[in-house]
Image (spheres, helix red, strand yellow):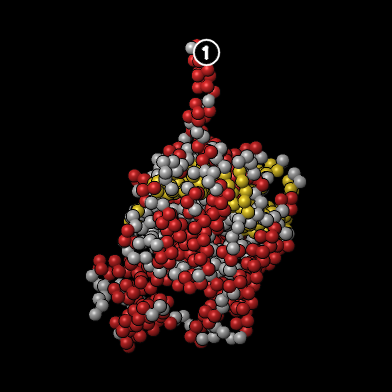
Amino acid sequence: MKNVLTIVLFFVSCSPFFTAAEKAPDPADRFALATYVGNHVQERSARALIQSVREFAGPYRNAPVYVVLGDAANFPCDSLKGENNHLLPLEMDPAFKDYPLAYKAFAAAQVEKAVGNRVKSLAWFDPACLVLGSLADLDLENGFGAAIRPVSLVNTIGIPPGEPPNDYWLPIYRELGLDAATLPAYETVVDEKPIQPYFNCEIFSVDPCLGVFSEWADMLTGLLKDETYQKQACTSFLRRLFLHQAVLSGVIISRVQPDKIKPLPLKTGYPFGQHDRLAAARKADSLNDLSALILDYAWDRDAAWLDRIPVAGGLKQRLIEAYTEYLRLTDRLYRIEGSCNSYLVLTNGGSVLIDPAGASAAPQYFQRLIADHPLKAILLTHAHRDHWDGLEAWRSDPSIPVIAQRYFTKYNEYWKRLAPFFARRGAIWARQPLPDPGDVEAFEPVVPSITFADEYTLELDGFHFHMVHTPGETPDHATIWIPELAAVFVGDNYYAYFVNNATLRGTLPRPLLGYIHALDLALSYDPEFFLMGHGTPLVRKPLIRDTVTNFRDALRYIHDETIAGINRGKDVCTLMREIKVPERFGIRPYFGKVEWTVRGVYEENVGWFDEDPASMYGLPVSSVYGDLVDLVGADAIIARAERRLAAGDPVQSLHLTAIVLKNDPGHAGANTIRIKALKTLRAGTFNYIERIWLDFGIRVSEENLATAKADGTEAKDD
C-alpha cells in the first residue's frame, strides 16, 4: 500500500497536468501584437512601443510582436529586431500607397495570416502608442471575438442610431448585409454622441480565426478601386482619412455578435490627444492608472506632453528616458519640436544647439544631454522669434557664442518698428482679443555675438558646422551643413505643407527664387538627414531627393507660370485663379496656398500697381459702396448675396455683403449671410492659415451683430 501511494504521489507531482505552468497558462502563448512602420518617425515610435511591451505588459510581455514594414528598402528597421519580434514587408497594391491609413488593413491582414490559429487574441497597436500596464483587456478569453471601443468623435462620419446609411456607408452596409434598424447603438468617447457601430482602430484586438482582418483588406480594396464611389462618396479629407475605420467597423459588427464584442475600457487605449476635451469623469487622473496610451502626434509635436497628465514614481523616470531616446534621430543628433524644431548635436568636445526656442517648451530633455556634453555654441538659422526665443536660458556661460547671419539684427529692428502691427496680427492668429497698440509688450530680440556675410564654419571636435547665407523666408536665412552627420538644416526655407512666401500675417517680401536656391543647395549636399524648422524631418537619401526635388520643382513651376502670365499682361487676380499646380506634384497646401504664392511672386517682381488708373489714388473701390446701396438698396444686394451663396459662390457672396456692411456694420441680413459664406469656405478648406482668417471674419460679424442688437440699431430683413 505504501508503494502504491508513493507511485501515485510521484505521478501527481510530475504530471504535466498538475505543474504550476499548466495551472496558470502563459497568456503570451495565446496573444500577439501587430503594428506598422513606414518611416523614420514610426520606426522610433515602434521601438518605444515594443520596449514598453517588454517592460510593462505584465504576463503579456513576451508575446510576439509583428511589425509590417511599409518601406523596407529605405527603412529595414534593424533597430526593431529582437527575440520574438517579427518583421514583414508590406504586401499592398502600390496604387493604394497614398490613400490615408489604408495600409493598416493590409498590414493587419498579413499578420492575421502569419499567426494563423496559433493565437486567440491578435492586438493591433498604431506605432505611436505606449503600453503602461497589463494587456488583459485585449485578451479575448471567454469566447469574445473582438475587444474595441467606439471612436472619440463623430467627425461628420458617424451616423445616428437607426438612421439609414448615407452614400458613404451604404456600400459597406449592402456588402455586409447590415440593417441600420437592427444595429446596436454606441456612444462616442469625447463628444458623447450616439452612433451606429463605428469603432476606433488605434488599439484593439480580434480573434484571428474569424478572418476579420482579411475581410477588412478585401472590402477596402473594392472600395478603393471603385472610381464612382471615390468620386461621389469620398468627397472630403475626413471621408478619405477614415474610410479604413468605417470598413473595419462594418466588418466587425457583421462578423462578431454584439455580446461577443468586449468593451475596451478607456484605460486601455486612452486618447492622449483628446485628454483636455474629455468629460471630467472620463479623464485619467494619472498615467500610472493606464494600461495603454494612444499618443498620436504628441511625441513628435508636443515637447511638453509629459506635463499634461500627472505621473509618479519609476514610471515617470522611464518615460523621460524613453522620450529622450525617441528624440534621437541618429547617434549624436537629437530633435525636439516646440515653437520650432530645435536640434542638439553632441560631440566628444561638447554640444551645439541649433534654434533653441523649440527646446525651451520642455528644456529638461536637452538639459539632461547637455549635462554630459557642455554647450559650446548656439546657431540660428534665421531671425524669426519662434526660433530664438528663450535663448539666454541656455547660455550658462556668456562666452558661449551665438552665431547668425549679419542681417539677423536688421530683421529684428524691422520687426520692432512694427511691433503693434504684429501684435494685432498675432492676436488674430491666436484667436485672442485685439490688443491696444499702446499696451504692446516691448520687443527685445537677442543679439548674436558672431555674425557672417556669406559663409561661416564652426569646428568642434572634428565636426564642421558650415553655415551658408540662403535668403528666402527671411533676408538673414542660413542653411547649415554638417558633413560628418550628412545632415542639412534648412530652417523655414522648406515646409512639408507648402511655403508661405506671401504670409497673411505680414512680412517683408520673401523671394520665391530664394527658397528654390536654398533647396538647390541643400540637395547638392546629398544629405541623409533633411532637417527643417517645423515639422517632421526627412530621412534617407532617396526619399530626400525625391521629396525635396518634387517640392522645389513645384515652386519653380508656380514661379515660372506667374512670370509668364505677367509678361502676357495678365493681372494678379487672373493669375491667382488660373495657375494650378499639376497633380503630379501632389501638393496639399496646409500653410501657404498656391494663390497666395502667385500673388507674392507678382508683387515681389512688379509691385502693387495693376494698370488701373484708379489704383493710383487713395480712394479704394469700397468708397463707392454707399452709392451702390443707394442705387439698388441693401435688400436687393443681400438677396443677390444669398443667391450667390446658394449657387456655390461664397466668395462673391462675401463681396456683396461687404457693400452693405461698409456703411452699416450691424446690418443683420448682411452679417448673417456673411457668416454663412465664411463657414462654407471654412468647411471646404484644408488650409490652416485660411481657417484662421475665416474664423476672424466670422468673429467680426458675430461681434457686429451683438453690438447692433445691444444698441438697438440692427437692420432687419424684409
| Quarter residue 670 falls in | bottom left
Q: Return the x and y of residue 705 as percentages of the image width and height.
A: 30, 69
Residue farthest toward the right in the current orientation of the protein: 462
**For the point 74% across and 48% down, which residue is it?**
463
* Residue that mark 1 sits on: 3
**For the point 65% across and 37% down, which residue is it?**
372
Q: Is residue 207 left or right of residue 44?
A: left
Q: What amino acid is at disc 1? A: Asn
**Mark 1: which secondary structure?**
helix
State the residue in front, 73 or 28: 28
Bin the neighbour count of mark 1 within 10 Å (Cα to Cα): few under 14, some 14-19, many 20 and up.
few
Residue farthest toward the top in the current orientation of the protein: 2
**For the point 48% across and 64% down, which residue is it?**
240
Q: Is residue 546 left or right of residue 607?
A: right
Whether residue 369 is visible here, answered yes or no, is no
Q: Return the x and y of residue 165 as percentages of the image width and height.
A: 37, 65
Q: Return the x and y of residue 560 as percentages of the image width and height.
A: 64, 77
Whether residue 714 is visible here, answered yes or no, is yes
